[in-house]
Amino acid sequence: MHTSRNYDVSRRKFMRTTAGGAAGLLVAPAVTTANKGNDQLIVGQRDHRYEVIHDWPQLPSHLRWQTTQNVALDSEGLLYVMHQGLNDLPQSDTILVFDQQGKFVRSFGSEFHGGGHGVEIRNENGQDFIYVAVYKKVRSIAKLDLFGERVWRRGAPLEAGIYAAGEDQIEHADGGKSRDRFHPTNIAFHPDGGFYVADGYGSYHIHKFDRDGNWELAFGGLGSDEGKFRLPHGLWVDDRNSQQPTLVVSDRVNARLQWFTLDGQQLRTRDGFLLPANNDVWGELMVVPDLVGRVTLLDSQNQVLAHLGDDSIRMSSDKESMIRSDPSKWQPGKFIHPHDACFDSEGNIIVAEWVATGRITKLRRLG
């Protein structure tokens, strides 16, 4: 059994110490321009230019964002936004659905209030299913249909041998974080129908499950050596090389991406990020939302093409928390805390930011 000592580091302290040292390792132009004729905000350069549309989804008046976390799209192009749901507010739906014009369609997921975090969607034999990872006092993983009907929901895989007794239960009176607790953050899909779960705030392991949800293996754990993690926050199956797909993990506090074989063998590392939070791919591109005020685009060789909406210097300052909590200090075309991003079928990028008032931005592809 792992020790219960809390190894979490101060996010603000880490950002202050890394912004100067790591920012120079991933160098690319961060260009923001305005088209005065129609007030367009444009970020990026050359073939990777995007119009910035902040607050794109139209939230109905009876709902409010409560710290937006993750985004996913279904086969019809509907957008699913997972927000946390704040414990000091009445229980509310945590998954909100919008159409391709950003208009509200429906909501569900009140059972995840207080811990909404990761959301992904996969088509299985012609039907889409939602997979969620939730943490804090409702820590668990679940599979739902597109209207929120539960297929299954479960807690920690005790067969992994790394969790305290009772962590397989769905709800917990104690929401504390330690290495023998289960606080999953994100989901990724194996090509064979199985899936991976990043236990980002708990054991720092990646778990692999089969298509029926049975646990198969775990890898990782706390550390800075290759193959180890200091907060494996996001993950994705990188199939840009279709002959040899790999699993890429956003190893957030180690400020790097790590690639693994699909059975968990470490292959390579890409350093030089700030606090990378998750990944998605479209064609030859990979998008990496970085919690320190920027969204990074990588090419097929994982070289930087652009830092979009880069406000990383300001967001790594001592005033970061004040900026985060005060929308009047947010600058058009700049990001505060990108927490997740996904491509749509046309290569547009949807960005969710970890801010208490919530913000979803659409980057409309121009190239």
Image: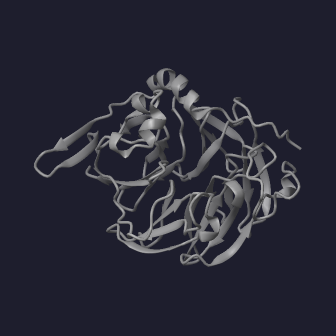
Note whether 313 is above or below 123 in the view shown: above
Closer to us: 67 or 312 = 67
Q: Is residue 75 left or right of residue 243?
A: left
Most extreme residue toward the left, as rendered?
Answer: 37
x, y percentage for residue 73? 46, 65
In the rendered structure, the answer to whether residue 105 lies left or right of residue 29 reads right
Above/below status of 155 relative to 129: above
In this view, 199 is above or below 7: below
Q: Which of 17 and 227 is in front in this view?
A: 17
Q: Residue at x 33, y 43 (%)?
A: 328
Question: Percent x, y for residue 359?
Answer: 41, 53
Which residue occupies 26% across, 40% down? 46
Which image quadrant is residue 223 in? top right
Percent position (x, y) of residue 115? 63, 58
* Residue 296 appears in the figure: no
Can the viewer see residue 185?
A: yes
Residue placed most toward the observer, 33 or 329? 329
Q: In this view, does 352 lie above or below 140?
A: above
Quarter assignment of residue 87? bottom right
Residue 187: x %, y % from top left: 62, 57
For the rendered model, the colour scheme is one colour
Q: How many labels does the image show?
A: 0
Question: Which residue is at a point 36% across and 63% down the rendered structure image?
Answer: 57
User: Which image quarter: residue 128?
Assistant: bottom right
